[in-house]
Image (cartoon, rainbow, N blue to C red):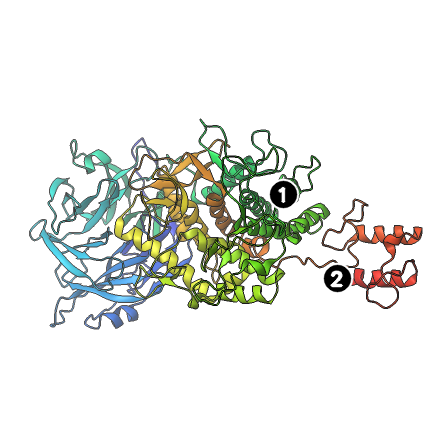
Amino acid sequence: MLGLVAPAFAQPIASVQPTTGGVESYAVAAASLAGLTATASASNDTVEVRDIAGSLLATVTRAQLQAVCPFLSLSETNDGPAALAFSDSGRLLFIAVTDTTVPGDGPSDAIVRLDIDTGQLTLFARAELGGPDTSRPRVGLAHYKGRLYVGGLGVVMGYSATMNQTAGTSLFVTTVSVGNNVVGITVDRPQNGLIVATSSTIYRAPITASNSLSFTTLGTRSNIRAITFAEHFGGILNPGLYILQSTLAPDNSIISKVSVAQARGTGGFTPTTYRTIAEPRHDLAATAEGTLLLGMPANAEQIRDDTDAKLTYDEFLADEFDQVVTLGRGLISPAGEPAGWVIDADVIPAWQWFHPASPDAACWTVLLLLASDEVHKENGGPGDPLAQQQVRTILQRYSGNSPDGIRPLRSADGIYWHWIDPVTGNAKAGWGDSYATMSTMKMVVAAARAAAYYPLDADIRRYARDIICNVTNWDAYFNSATNPTFRYQIYMLAQGAGGPDLFSGGSAFNESILFADQAAFYGGAFSDLGATHWYNAPGLPSASLLTGRPVRTNSAGSHLPAFISLYPLLLLENYRASPDWQTHVRNLRASNAAWTDDNAPQFNTVFSAGTTYVNGYNADSLSNHPGDLTTFTSLLAFAAGDGASAGRHVEAGGAYQAYRTGGRQTFKTGASILYRRSNVDRNYRPDSAGLPDVALGALGLAELLAPGAIARVLTGEYPSCDVCPADLDDGSGDGIPDGGVDINDLLFFLAGFEAGSLSADLDNGSGSGQPDGGVDINDLLFFLSHFEGGC
């Protein structure tokens, strides 16, 4: 039994976090900005990495440690992993390994670097990590802003540990307390402070760019084993510095708490006892999910505080998804516009909506509604009761079938105008734009997915057909130039009378891969060649931030915003199934994580497009990111996995940390979501949020909430635009086909056949579908053969 003594303001709630075989967790660690934890066993010298959902992601064995550190002589006692430290994003895990055997060729101990994503394990540095050599010492270890801080005997050692350094470079050695081992190191991230502890004293130093540390004493405490700075643990009174102490007789443990102010050196140093435990605890780490992780003699332990009023991680996933759906459906004719129009962006509550309607917004709202219906059907639920009707209304409007006759402006090739005046369906005055292939491809994908998800809804199928099949001349939108720089460019804009604007070409790779994918299905041979070019990832330009991990782009050396890679990750089956594009997605995710690790922003940062205080709107990338704004929705889109693996809780856990530390923002629709935050101006809040920049995060979350949702709902084949001879009516009785064959077609044919109407004159007996001016048995046989085959 656990003996708990807590102060009146809080009550710890403990739960077991299992380790494989229930082995001891001598050392523990947690990523500050990602859903990752790690434990290290003292008995079998094994390190395990788990995500916030508890899935085992990586294991490092004694044999692997020995292989990269052949000078070590590891056994089951008194040596092995003694400390762990993640980089902020969780991309890297550093493992301090101590050895009781003196090798004779250098320091006895080692620091090993694990790349969680690739599994690469390297010797980062050799060092003496404290003594004596007859026992396993406590070791302080922390990574922050591209540096690794390591505790030794009376000193803190600083190493350069930037993103591409598999081996460390020594920067400095600063004395802390002569003869006393540094047993713990933690970082006060909001204030750039390094806090270290010996077994009896706690010190603090500001983290600067200089190769030195200047420590001041915070206070004393007896028998210190570990420390951690918890920025958002528990309720509003819980954040602060937590100290794990042992009581040597008997071997019990105490967790003490130092307030944030005291941990920053203001006021006195008066720790309070947070919890006493009637058995030993080995190590302590604050997690991104707002808990404390403790090492135990068997398994590990998580502590949550009962004053924590925030949503749990699972509750957050469901709520964030629903909040974004609320934003999307709240932009369906929000200010009295004719039914079915979707305006492009939400605004802050004090403003009035002012954005025009757009096909882009309609697309993302349709996809959000489909995903919502699917997610809410998970585990036998009833689904989203409003989704199907709202999808039907949107598609009716954008297909031009609304009863008020207001139709969206489209070119002779069916290309949609981007910014639409919802009152007239024509161009919105003051919003200069044109017919846009990028807007059109989004309407096509939304219509196709809706028709597939609601196959029995004849109206949705008919509206989808009118949207999709009125797009023509696909081949013309690929540049046919022989110059390889321009060949197979996709024209972004169209002319009203038909054909592309020849001055609007964009080269692979950009989000127009959606258009290429559709053209391969609906276009001719030239579209097939164009799509092959766009899908050929190795043949496209690349840019690299991480050594050996290039990402694809459209201009060598220049990175693209993350959303360009995330749209097809969510929507294109061929992209998700491609090993080359899967590698690209993993490399893009790792590159953004690496930037986070080297720059220590407030939140796990992914650079993508969105509203910004710098110039109103910017397509941020690793090459260009004024204001250092993270786009949480793109971070969450990475939860969709990479196409080869299941959804990822690592990035979703990072978004949860952002929620816990105030990253959400409320908009006029009433939705409170994670959108954009600046690391340069931390008080900045965007004044608007466009659906194309928001929806992808919720669609990524759908894969976590309803595994397989992307395959079932968001990707798949496109409906044929060929007219099926048995597709005669959509149920209205007016003889309009809807792209499918069902009972409505049978009833329509039989009514015409019995009446001798020419509507049933389908074939002259040749089987070629040529009418002959009369109705007879040949027409019946022809209809039934196609009806039974489903065309």
- Please give the label number shown on residue 629: none
Viewer-side residue, 124 vs 254: 124
Label 2 belongs to which residue? 791
| Cβ atoms at labels 2 and 1 below 8 Å apart | no
Q: Is 668 situated left or right of 757 in this image?
A: left
Q: Position of residue 397 (x, y in %)?
A: 64, 40
Three-letter code, disc 2: Cys
Closer to the camera in the image, 730 or 296: 730
Q: Which corner quadrant holds the C terminus? A: bottom right
From this viewpoint, is residue 13 visible? no
In the picture shown, does residue 530 fall above or below 624?
Answer: below
Give the answer, above or below, for where 505 lies relative to 203.
below
- Identify which residue, 550 or 285, lies in the foreground: 550
Task: Please tell me whether mark 2 or mark 1 is closer to you in this view.
Answer: 1
Q: CA distance from mark 2 to mark 1?
A: 27 Å
Q: Is residue 119 left or right of residue 673?
A: left
- Looking at the rendered structure, the secondary structure element under dot 2 is loop
Q: Which residue is mark 1?
A: 398
Residue 414 shows in the view: yes
As drawn, the residue found furthest toward the top would be: 350
Identify the image quadrant of residue 241: top left
> Where residue 631 sits in the image (x, y, percent)?
39, 45
Q: Quadrant of residue 540?
A: bottom left
| Chain-order first, disc 2 or disc 1 | 1
Crowd class of label 2 (few under 14; some 14 to 19; many from 20; radius 10 Å): some
Which residue occupies the foreground of this view, 495 or 491? 495
Q: Residue furthest left?
A: 178
Secondary structure of the residue carrying numbered label 1: helix
Name the image quarter holding residue 161: bottom left
Above-or-below relation of 107 to 90: below
